[in-house]
Amino acid sequence: MDVLVFATSVRQKRQVSRVQNLLTKVPAIAQWNFDLEDCDNILRVEAKDISPRYIESLLQKAGIHCQELSY
């Protein structure tokens, strides 16, 4: 299982709900969560065999900025 970390433009809980609809439909994603207290509005995704670019593209199509962070 890989842990992917992204900076996002999500700032409000209603935006989290919109992202939830996208992420829960992806079978490779085991878990995900947001840290809206962080200055980068961090999204952490636990997934198996999924590209960070796929997550970025998925969210960007929904109008949400998403960029992988190296850690």
Image (spheres, grey):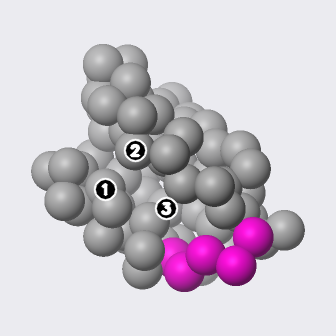
Look at the numbered disc 3 and give the secondary structure of its residue.
strand
Q: Nearer the viewer, mark 3 or mark 1?
A: 1
Pointers 2 and 1 in contact (C-beta within 8 Å): yes
Amino acid type at mark 2 = Leu
Q: Residue at x 74, y 50 (%)?
A: 30
Q: Which residue is mark 3?
A: 6
How busy is the neighbourhood of tag 3: few (under 14 within 10 Å), some, or many (20 plus)? Answer: many
Q: Which mark is first along the chain, 1 or 3?
A: 3
Percent of width and height locating residue 2 = 77, 71
User: Measuring 32% from the left and 31% from the top, which residue is drawn there?
Assistant: 18
Relative horizontal placement of residue 47, taking residue 5 as reference (left or right): right
Answer whether residue 45 is visible to the viewer in this image. no
Q: If you read the primary sequence from the N terminus, does the residue marked by circle 2 or circle 1 appear first?
A: 2
SS at mark 1?
Answer: helix
> In the image, which disc is placed on residue 59?
1
Q: Position of residue 5 (x, y in %)?
A: 59, 63
Task: Tell how many labels.
Answer: 3
Q: Quadrant of the N terminus?
A: bottom right
**Position of residue 20 measured from the top left corner of the image (x, y, whole percent):** 45, 34
Q: Specify start and end residues of the magenta stretch as a single range.
A: 48-52
Q: Vertically, is 37 above or below 65? A: above
Q: Main secondary structure of the magenta part?
A: loop
Q: Quadrant of residue 66?
A: bottom left
Lower sequence index among marks 3 and 2: 3
> Which residue is the site of mark 2?
22
* Number of residues whose C-alpha sits closer than 10 Å to that of mark 2, classed few (under 14), some (14–19) or many (20 or more): some
- In percent of width and height, residue 61 lies at 19, 59
* Residue that extends furthest to the right in the rendered view of this protein: 1
